[in-house]
Image (spheres, rainbow, N blue to C red):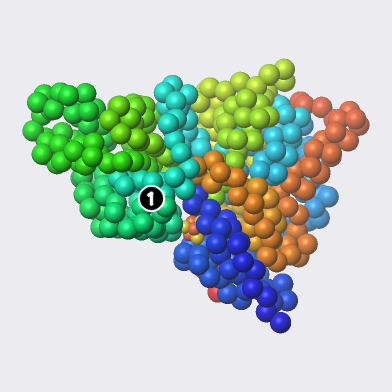
Amino acid sequence: MPEVIKNVACPYCGACCDDLEVTVEDGKILEVKNACIIGTEIYHHASREGRVGSPRMRQPDGTYKDITYDEAIDYTARMLIKAKKPLIYGFGSTNCEGQAAAGRVAEEAGAVLDNCASICHGSSFLAIFDTGYPSCTLGEVKNRADVVIYWGSNPAHAHPRHMSRYGVFPRGFFTNKGHRGRKVICVDPRYTDTARCADYFLQVKQGHDYDLFDAFRMVMHGYADDVPEIVAGVPKEKILEVCDIIKKGRYVHIFFGMGLCHSDGRNHNIDIAINLVRDINEVTKCTIMAMRGHYNIAGPGVVWSWQFGFPYCIDLSKGSHAHMNPGETSSVDLANRGEVDAFINIGTDAGAHFPIRAFEKLGSHIPMVTIDPSVNMAATVSDVHIPVAIVGVETGGICYRMDNVPIQYRAVVPPYNGILTDEELFNRILNRMLELKEQGIECDGKWEYAKAIPSLIPVKLEPEA
Ligand code: SF4
């Protein structure tokens, strides 16, 4: 008899939609309601035939052989103990319980602990350290914001239900006319599908957002006359028009994304955006929010700040204290400089998303373990691939939405083939490390690959049936 499970939270993007309805029967997912196409696919993926159901170790001929969890855990524990400076990276796609358990393993291993913020909103963290974070919750945007700015972000593709749940279309307590009561402004070099939904589109010259923020700040400070006729490709009259809308707004909110974090200026683009928010608050109410990517990429920032005092790029190799210095202790920089000697890729795909030169140094030069429910590019060059339960589908837990609101995730089906959760796996790795250390296994920088990789050739993943 099919059962409909309501109030299910989606484990894909930082919008963390928690209104999904999932129909299940005999441990299989039949139907998903309310999710966007990306979220729906997560659930159907979980029920597909041919998922990896046990850990696998790469053989010398490049094939993989199934091994037991005990063997995979023993390999990983030995690798972490033997390594002088292992790197444990990822965590965007797991729950806070798994992130906390990994933090304990990293501490025992003297590892560098880092998450996907390192290649995503890490520059936002740097700006927030410098300048503060005048932010709010998504509920406040929905209920109060009558001027919404999407700057360097494209939720129509990256967070597909963001505009309908929070930013543009919903009718809130003080915004009961929905989109008709809001002015939506999009700033982007491209005329995106988000721009198509906006009332005003400012086509900024790629990499010149800082100049445009500067012009906005000049207007807010009363120096409109000194603004040049064109700034960053945007005519002055448009800048003045949008500034006027902002000044007349009751509640202005700015969402920003990779257009600021990944372009020239990086953290300084966010710095100046936050300073603009301060300026606008002299006139009306204004807040700002990072469009965090994965459903729980805000989680490590919260969990590890409790554990270690830092949100990402945490070097625990000194033993006595944690140290954080992005640029020095960030994953890509460590990889590029060849400063780590073992790598765990967990809840992400460094193979797909790191610069290829950095990943080559990790994937083909040092032992590597991938912990992920699926076969991804990192898994195809790892010594060991350990499958785990999918959060929000096969196991629950706490995940932090892009506005740092914790959402309780729930399981809708049991874990495929009895596979472990990330938390269970990291707890067992920690226990095995303690056992091995008691037996006298020590860090000596000598740990063999499980295999020899002839070259780092990206493996073409077969399309799913
Ligand atoms: S918008 Fe994001 S969280 Fe919501 S259903 Fe789509 S992928 Fe899932």
Dot 1, crowdedness within 10 Å: few (<14), some or many (≥20)? some
The C terminus sits in image quarter: bottom right
Q: Position of residue 176 (x, y in %)?
A: 36, 56
- Report which quarter residue 29 is drawn in: bottom right
Q: Which residue is mark 1?
A: 174
Residue 232 in sight in this render: yes
Q: Residue at x 18, y 38 (%)?
A: 244
Q: Is residue 68 left or right of residue 94?
A: right
The N terminus sits in image quarter: bottom right
The residue most toward the bottom is 1
Q: Note whether 64 is above or below 246 in the view shown.
A: below
- Report which quarter residue 313 is drawn in: top right
Q: Secondary structure at mark 1?
A: loop
Q: Position of residue 355 (x, y in %)?
A: 45, 40
Query: Toward the viewer: 435 or 442?
Result: 435
Q: Give the residue type that dot 1 points to.
A: Phe
Q: Residue at x 72, y 29 (%)?
A: 107
Q: Is residue 56 left or right of residue 188?
A: right
The residue most toward the right is 439
Q: Residue at x 44, y 35 (%)?
A: 135
Q: Position of residue 274 (x, y in %)?
A: 36, 29
Q: Is residue 157 left or right of residue 242?
A: right
Q: Note whether 12 is above or below 436 in the view shown.
A: below
Query: Toward the viewer: 299 or 223?
Result: 223
Q: Is residue 9 left or right of residue 265?
A: right
Q: Position of residue 462 (x, y in %)?
A: 53, 66
Q: Residue at x 12, y 36 (%)?
A: 236
Q: Note whether 79 is above or below 411 in the view shown.
A: above
